[in-house]
Amino acid sequence: MNIGIVGHEAAKFTVEAEDEAFQIIRELLEPRDAVLVSGGCHLGGVDVWAEWIADEKGRAKIIHLPKTLAWATGYKPRNLLIARDSDEVHVIVVCKYPPGYSGMRFDLCYHCHTSDHIKSGACWTAKQAQRLVKLTVWHEIL
């Protein structure tokens, strides 16, 4: 089964939230037939952690790297490939910014129209998977 695992970049996680993300990823990749589908985010975080755990568990991987670091020519086509190639997509996001986070901030996740978690492009990917009638699950880390 192809398991899409996407989520926030590393800078949006506290040490405790990172530990929780690792636990979620380990559980998702536990089945022997699990194949990781992800996007190799250049900023680290969920995509890269999922690759590490897939390697640790000896799971196959399908990694769609963006061709460019731009939405139209890189991230959008990459995210569509993740949605297409996954049987289910899991989004791992945090509910608040960590202390000292200096990146862009948004009042809500405009993909989900919620303030339950902070904005993530991973949510856009999951919405595309939903359009393809695939199971999507959000793992919101407090």
Image (tube, rainbow, N blue to C red):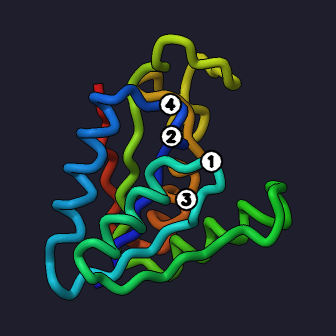
Of mark 4 and mark 1, the one earlier in the sequence is: 4
Of mark 4 and mark 3, the one earlier in the sequence is: 4
Using the image, determine if residue 26 lies above or below residue 104: below
Element type where label 3 sits in the image = helix
Quick one: label 4, few (<14), some, or many (20+) residues within 10 Å? many
Mark 4 — residue?
A: 12
Mark 3 — residue?
A: 125
* Residue 128 position within the rendered picture, expressed as x and y whole percent measured from the top left: 55, 63
Mark 2 — residue?
A: 10
> Residue lying farthest top?
99
Left or right of residue 112: residue 94: left
Quick one: label 2, few (<14), some, or many (20+) residues within 10 Å? some
Quick one: label 1, few (<14), some, or many (20+) residues within 10 Å? few
What residue type is disc 4 on?
A: Lys
Marks 3/2: CA distance?
Answer: 18 Å
Tell me the residue at 80%/55% (across/down): 71
Mark 1 — residue?
A: 43
Using the image, determine if residue 52 lies above or below residue 113: below
Element type where label 4 sits in the image = helix
